[in-house]
Image (spheres, helix red, strand yellow):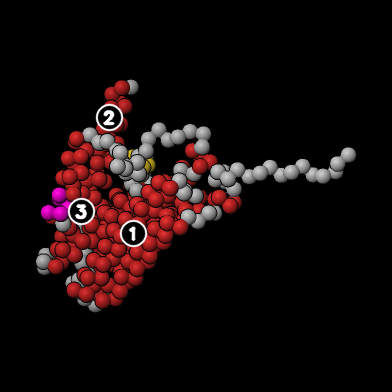
Amino acid sequence: MSTDAPDAPTPDPEDPFTAENASRIYFLPNLMTAGNLFCGFVACIKCVQAHYLMRGADVITPGASELFSEAVWLIFGAMAFDVLDGRLARMGGRESLFGGEFDSLADMVSFGLTPALMMFFLILSPTQGYPIFQKIGWFFGFVYLLCAAIRLARFNVITHPLITRNHKPASKDFIGLPVPAAAGTVAALVLFLLNLAKHDRELQMWALALPPLLILIAVLMVSRISYPSGKQIDMQTKTPLTSFVLFLAAASAIVAFKEVGMLVVMLGYIFWGIYRSLRSRSSNAENV
């Protein structure tokens, strides 16, 4: 009679929940994520350097303006890397739990911390607004950072394979304003303010309008409002004529009006989600 122990079951090489598969690092997607993190880190440095150049000044100095502009374009660079890492992973079937967590940590720096610094150092700068921002400006930046962290954590939970393995989501839309879109709006707002300062226009008139807008952006990240996702768009994607025309109009606005056009497009995306949510609730109420 044999006393040998039964052979252990062979692990499924496709099982994402094994330690080996969950921690697997795929080169190209994670290289893009590293690029995202690099852009966010350098953008943070640019914001701090710009803040030091503005100390004691009542206006945005040319050197500080250039550094803030560089930080903005680094955020847009991080957004490009963020798009590429997910698309490369999906195209090659190389998604892993490690990649998802790494991506969220990079997003927290590029789209959480950097915009929060921009809010405090420039958008809510006490020298460009009202003295009260010197006392509470940090709070707006923290609220944004907190909401970005919650949004990323919630996304990781609701898209985890353990949650979605028995059923696929009914919609591909994002739940809540995506963190990159929120950061893009803050970055576009910074470009808009820098453009005003460059042309010697008064910034103080915007001071009372900016805090509510920034709080709205933060709250929308943790809301249940759905926003369109571009993850499924590829060379084979078909689109209605209206959507195609709107896309061309948005691209044309950015090219023609630059800073203003970019801000309008980002705000249009934000308020489109709000409008669509209100319209959906109104339709549901009428059907009850």
Q: Eyeballing the image, is 55 above or below 126?
A: below
Per the rendered image, the range of residues in magenta is 252-256
- Of badges 1 and 3, the one in the foreground is 1
The residue under the point 48% across, 55% down is 26
Is residue 104 shown left or right of residue 205? right
Q: Eyeballing the image, is 220 above or below 277?
A: below
- Residues at discs 3 and 2 in contact (Cβ within 8 Å): no
Among numbered discs 3 and 2, the one appearing first in the sequence: 3
Viewer-proximal residue, 267 or 3?
3
Give the label on residue 263, or none.
Answer: 3
Three-letter residue code for mark 1: Ala
Spot occupied by residue 8 in the image (x, y as percentages of width and height)? 71, 44
User: Would you name the residue on which mark 1 appears?
Assistant: 78
Viewer-proximal residue, 203 or 156?
156
Spot occupied by residue 131 in the image (x, y as percentages of width and height)? 24, 67
Whether the magenta-drawn stretch holds residue 92 is answered as no
Three-letter residue code for mark 3: Leu
Whether the magenta-drawn stretch holds residue 253 is answered as yes
Spot occupied by residue 275 in the image (x, y as percentages of width and height)? 25, 38
User: Would you name the residue on which mark 2 appears?
Assistant: 282
User: Image quadrant of residue 75?
Assistant: bottom left
Three-letter residue code for mark 2: Ser
The residue under the point 30% across, 69% down is 47
The residue under the point 15% across, 49% down is 252
CA distance separating discs 3 and 2 = 28 Å
CA distance separating discs 2 and 1 = 37 Å
